[in-house]
């Protein structure tokens, strides 16, 4: 793929600061000017990891351990270390990951990933589980995760224990970041529904819609797209592969096609 579609474009990156490096690096390599505008802060769960630590001490009780984000992997691995357990302790159960980035983060630490859905959303993950009835599932998720996976597994007859392993909080961008928005941006990117909601909360409905009206709005998948539309933002690009590389590839394809019109 050539670098021309993104060259010189001001691209707003709304990921949490700790997660943004890969996306910023990829955008710069394609000639873009990334504007880091974190809308999310990742914090420990409200109970100080009490529920997570208890569940990790009972890994042998579960048939499946399910990860729905890289953040979840990172928090779980830190708690395993705190408890004196190796990452391989997760191999006592079968492990499912919602997408390739999550799977790669697990595999890098010696965890076997038994299931990865074709599409990287909760509904596809639910459909991918073979014969969930009677199986015990440990869902490791964010505090604001959608209930679709939990409810779907329980409806299929599974025994589900759900644990919030981290919280997503509203970030407070620096005044300089807010000031840079006044100059406008060419592209708004969102990699989670919470990023869209928090962006609108930070800048306000009116400015969010003004910026979206003047820019290309690119989102990582259909759930994030639905959230953006519900908040009054037009969506131009929905990544076919729900990953950061997939989002950037879809964005480049959209801009290249538009430039030929």
Image: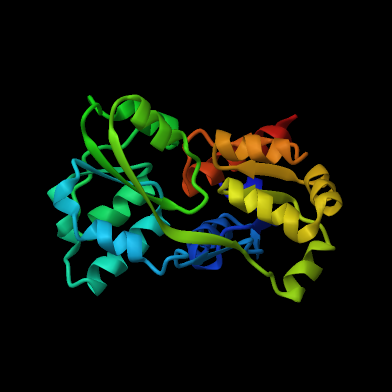
**What residue is shown at x 35% (from left), y 26% (from top)?**
127
Residue 256 visible? The answer is no
Using the image as rendered, state which of residue 129 and residue 208 is in the foreground: 129
**What residue is shown at x 78% (from left), y 59% (from top)?**
203
Q: Is residue 142 above or below residue 220?
A: below
Q: Is residue 207 above or below residue 122?
A: below
Query: What is the total number of numbered labels drawn onto the structure image?
Result: 0
**Residue 121, position as x, y percentages in the image:** 45, 36
**Residue 235, position as x, y percentages in the image:** 70, 36
Quarter of the view holding residue 14: bottom right
**What residue is shown at x 25% (from left), y 74% (from top)?**
82
Residue 116 visible? The answer is yes
Using the image as rendered, state which of residue 144 and residue 1 is in the foreground: 144
Q: Is residue 29 left or right of residue 218?
A: left
**Residue 178, position as x, y percentages in the image:** 77, 68
Quarter of the view holding residue 71: bottom left
Q: Is residue 37 left or right of residue 220?
A: right
**Residue 230, position as x, y percentages in the image:** 72, 36
Using the image as rendered, state which of residue 193 and residue 59 is in the foreground: 59
Q: Quadrant of the C terminus?
A: top right
């Amino acid at each position: 793929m050539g670098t021309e579609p993104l060259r010189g474009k001001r691209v707003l990156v709304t990921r949490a600061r700790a997660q943004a490096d890969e996306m910023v690096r990829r955008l710069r390599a394609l000639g873009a000017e990334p504007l880091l505008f974190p809308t999310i802060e990742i914090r420990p769960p409200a109970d100080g990891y009490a529920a997570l630590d208890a569940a990790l001490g009972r890994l042998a009780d579960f048939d499946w351990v399910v990860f729905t984000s890289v953040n979840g992997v990172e928090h779980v691995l830190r708690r395993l270390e705190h408890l004196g357990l190796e990452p391989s302790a997760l191999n006592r159960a079968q492990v499912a990951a919602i997408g390739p980035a999550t799977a790669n983060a697990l595999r890098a630490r010696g965890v076997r990933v038994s299931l990865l859905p074709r599409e990287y959303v909760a509904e596809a993950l639910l459909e991918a589980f073979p014969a969930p009835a009677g199986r015990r599932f440990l869902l490791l998720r964010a505090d604001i995760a959608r209930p679709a996976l939990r409810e779907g597994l329980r409806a299929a007859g599974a025994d589900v224990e759900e644990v919030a392993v981290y919280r997503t909080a509203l970030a407070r961008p620096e005044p300089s970041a807010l000031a840079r928005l006044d100059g406008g941006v060419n592209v708004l990117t969102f990699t989670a529904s919470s990023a869209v909601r928090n962006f609108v909360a930070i800048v306000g409905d009116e400015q969010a819609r003004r910026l979206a009206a003047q820019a290309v709005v690119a989102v990582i998948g259909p759930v994030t797209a639905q959230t953006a539309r519900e908040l009054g933002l037009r969506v131009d690009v929905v990544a076919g592969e729900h990953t950061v590389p997939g989002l950037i590839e879809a964005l480049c394809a959209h801009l290249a096609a538009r430039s030929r019109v």
